[in-house]
Amino acid sequence: MSTIIITAAVITVVGLVVGIALVYTGKKFHVDVDPREAAVRECLPGNNCGACGYAGCDAMAAAIAKGEAPAGGCPVGGQSVADKIGAIMGVSADATVRKIAFVKCKGNCDVTRNQGNYIGINDCRSAVLSGINVAECEYGCLGFGSCATVCPNDAIRVNNGVAEINRSKCVGCGLCTKACPKGLIELIPATNFVAVQCSNRDRGPQVKKVCSAGCIGCMICMRQCESDAIHVENNLAKIDYAKCTQCGKCVAKCPAKVILPPFGSAVAAEEAAKEA
């Protein structure tokens, strides 16, 4: 019996000593937390996607509270979140433009083909690192879906050999842009959806040999644009989204039909009706 009592007493004493030590250590190394940090964290969406450049929403909230990051630094939250954080921090949040991912390739299985069978890990980066050019178009989408794998919102799917973005689900986190080893995905303004769906920088005749839906660098789109918003560089049309007025003239005149029409426009509606 005495052994049990001694053991219980020892455990009690040890527990008290450890508890006192923990309390002392907590006070000794206590770091005051800015209450604004917690308030900012509540406003952030919690995706922890890293698109803001920080490890996650906690790190982003801490940076905003310290003044090291802007109130509108979260690309996923958009203007509403920026305004809430701006009110907490007592600053005016700059206007933010919602962006969504866009795949710069139209080379599905109907307009191009593979030149060999890839046997390996079903991953785009692994396929590229293998040194084998799977598709005839060396600039095109491989279709293994690495971008879809990293998407936290199920906004990407591979359809007929090419990755496609669901505009309504995409939050513009940018994870897919980092996952694509060929750099085929970029973030563009969600409200200005005239975009060139090709990345091939070869000359027209070579493009046609490997993909019937590729940009041939004919410059017709450039001549149609009255806003100087589209130029052909390295045999590939590129759009300046800051200048684009979404008139759709380049879309109508593109002989390769490789320029997407403005989202929500009459031209887009016609294209959607054809696809239906």
Image: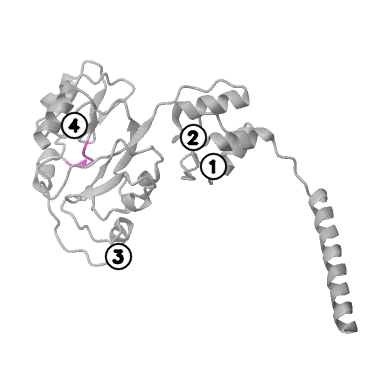
| Tag in front: 3 or 1 | 1
34 horizontally vs 75: left or right: right
Q: In this rendering, is residue 101 above or below 190? A: below
Q: Which mark is residue 259?
A: 4
Instruction: Check if residue 207 falls in the magenta segment.
Output: no
Disc 4 residue crowd, few under 14, some 14–19, many 20+, Cα 10 Å: many
Q: Which residue is mark 3?
A: 121
Would you place residue 220 above or below residue 3 in this image?
A: above
Question: Mark 4: which secondary structure?
Answer: strand
Magenta residues span 197-202
Instruction: Give the amino acid at mark 1.
Output: Cys
Q: Nearer the viewer, mark 2 or mark 3?
A: 2
Q: Is residue 200 magenta?
A: yes
Residue 263 lies left or right of residue 64; in this view the side is left
Q: Quadrant of residue 119?
A: bottom left
Residue 3, percent from left and from top: 87, 83
Disc 1: which residue: 57
Disc 1 to disc 4, C-alpha distance = 36 Å
* Residue 11 rendering spot, x and y as whole percentages: 83, 72
Q: Image quadrant of residue 208?
A: top left
Q: Nearer the viewer, mark 1 or mark 4?
A: 1
Q: CA distance from mark 3 to mark 1?
A: 32 Å
